[in-house]
């Protein structure tokens, strides 16, 4: 089909205001966060499931490739129109349709930005857990298609553990419902197939999400070790105690960790050169950091757990730590200093 007639037909289906077809727009939508580039022949920004369905049906009937797109931040080239065709950008479908707080469910359109949803829920004392680092801009649809996750994976799992149902537009424009508000739906586990399928099985136009109450108490700790092994042993000990922290992260050499280390440890806590700091990072697995500083390995952990419990256990976990920070107070043991702030 001629490009101009295709654009004309798409304008007829979704309205002029929802179709982009200038060279500048082709350039803007030719890439994501991967290294792949390829221009679409037309960009459509539908505002309803019905419009998505009409566009997909039209593309199917005329054998035109389609690609779904959220914020375009994926690293695998999934939202690049490698064979040209139509980029279906879901960012205008960004409404929260149902806040069923009582049943711990929300229903959203796929273009809702992950952090926006979290901010809305926070006002009610609730939380949507999946936390890709890109959550400030990414969409729920893109998160589900990539099965994204972040530091909270350890305790709460990835996106597919929090998406219980979807409305899906299939390759021919047909609209189907998969899953729902219940935790376990009868029949095949199609949600398991759809999560992480990068939009290859259909376009999500609505999603039912699981939410949870915010933790009543959160303690954040920062430990600084002389070696990767010591940090690793502490993690094993924490998990061995039967406690799964909400997050547990290791940062060995970034500028932020160095400055955090400096704050915690005073002047001595800075590696002498950038090179020594790098060697103590994950790439130099198993190697101890150069002595002198207490910067090299930093573990920070956030866990909903009563403070007295942590205070009782933490000295045991972090025997090898040079320095540990909690929240408001400071006390010392023979082996180390623990700050509670
Ligand atoms: C700085 C940065 C940090 C990042 N951090 C993380 C991280 O911590 N964890 C992590 O997992 N990822 C991370 N990513 C990768 C990326 O942000 C995630 O994969 C994110 O989920 C993509 O969402 P998006 O809205 O940008 O989707 P897009 O990139 O637009 O699309 C991603 C895929 O989903 C498909 N898709 C989009 N919307 C739909 C829909 N409605 N229905 C069906 N398919 C759809 C697209 O076709 C494509 O295949 C990061 C990326 C960057 C650039």
Image (cartoon, rainbow, N blue to C red):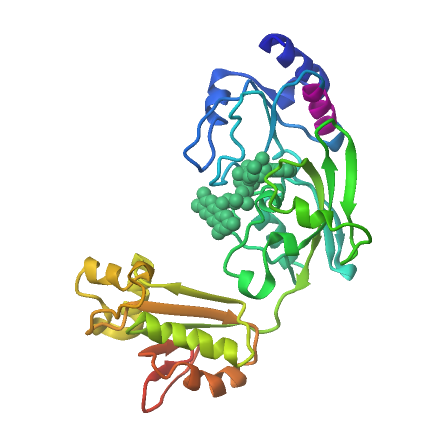
Please, which residue is most extreme toward the front here?
188
Please, which residue is most extreme toward the right here?
186
Where 265 falls versus 157 (above or below)? below
For residue 283: magenta?
A: no
Asked whether, in this view, residue 122 is left or right of residue 54, the answer is left
Where 290 falls versus 328 (above or below)? above
Q: Position of residue 180 (x, y in %)?
A: 78, 50
- Please say whether residue 180 is visible from this viewpoint: yes
Which quarter shows the C terminus? bottom left
Please, which residue is most extreme toward the bottom here?
334
- Please say whether residue 133 is visible from this viewpoint: no
Q: Position of residue 232 (x, y in %)?
A: 39, 72
Q: Nearer the viewer, residue 150 or 196?
A: 196
Q: Position of residue 275 (x, y in %)?
A: 20, 58
Q: Nearer the viewer, residue 4 or 228?
A: 228
Where 27 falls versus 181 (above or below)? above
Where 89 falls versus 267 (above or below)? above
Which quarter shows the N terminus? top right
Q: Position of residue 69 (x, y in %)?
A: 58, 33
Asked whether, in this view, residue 323 is left or right of residue 84, the answer is left
- In the image, the segment drawn in magenta is 51-60
Asked whether, in this view, residue 235 is left or right of residue 117, the answer is left
Q: Residue at x 58, y 41 (%)?
A: 142
Q: Residue at x 32, y 85 (%)?
A: 336
Quarter residue 37 falls in = top left
- Secondary structure mostly seen in magenta is helix
Quarter residue 170 falls in = top right
Q: Nearer the viewer, residue 108 or 275?
A: 275
């Amino acid at each position: 089909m001629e490009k101009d007639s295709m654009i004309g037909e798409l304008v007829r289906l979704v309205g002029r205001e929802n179709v982009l077809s200038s060279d500048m727009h082709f350039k803007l939508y030719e890439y994501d966060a991967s290294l792949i580039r390829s221009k679409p022949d037309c960009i459509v920004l539908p505002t309803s499931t019905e419009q998505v369905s009409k566009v997909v049906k039209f593309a199917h009937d005329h054998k035109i490739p389609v690609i779904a797109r959220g914020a375009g931040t994926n690293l695998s080239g999934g939202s690049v129109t490698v064979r040209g065709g139509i980029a279906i950008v879901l960012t205008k479908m960004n409404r929260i349709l149902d806040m069923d707080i009582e049943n711990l469910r929300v229903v959203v359109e796929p273009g809702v930005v992950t952090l926006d949803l979290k901010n809305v829920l926070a006002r009610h004392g609730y939380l949507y857990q999946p936390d890709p680092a890109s959550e400030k801009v990414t969409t729920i649809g893109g998160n589900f298609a990539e099965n994204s996750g972040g530091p909270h994976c350890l305790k709460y799992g990835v996106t597919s553990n929090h998406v219980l149902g979807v409305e899906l537009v299939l390759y021919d424009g047909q609209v189907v419902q998969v899953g729902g508000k219940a935790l376990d739906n009868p029949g095949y586990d199609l949600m398991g197939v759809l999560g992480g399928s990068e939009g290859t099985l259909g376009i999500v136009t609505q999603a039912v999400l699981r939410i949870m109450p915010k933790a009543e108490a959160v303690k954040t700790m920062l430990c600084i070790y002389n070696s990767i092994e010591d940090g690793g042993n502490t993690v094993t000990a924490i998990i061995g105690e039967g406690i799964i922290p909400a997050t547990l992260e290791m940062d060995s050499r970034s500028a932020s960790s160095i400055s955090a280390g400096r704050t915690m440890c005073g002047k001595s806590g800075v590696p002498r050169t950038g090179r020594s700091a790098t060697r103590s990072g994950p790439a130099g697995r198993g190697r101890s950091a150069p002595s002198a500083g207490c910067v090299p390995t930093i573990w920070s952990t956030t866990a909903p757990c009563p403070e007295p419990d942590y205070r009782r256990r933490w000295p045991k976990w972090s025997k090898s730590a040079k320095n540990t920070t909690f929240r408001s107070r400071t006390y010392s043991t023979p082996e180390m200093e623990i700050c509670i702030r």
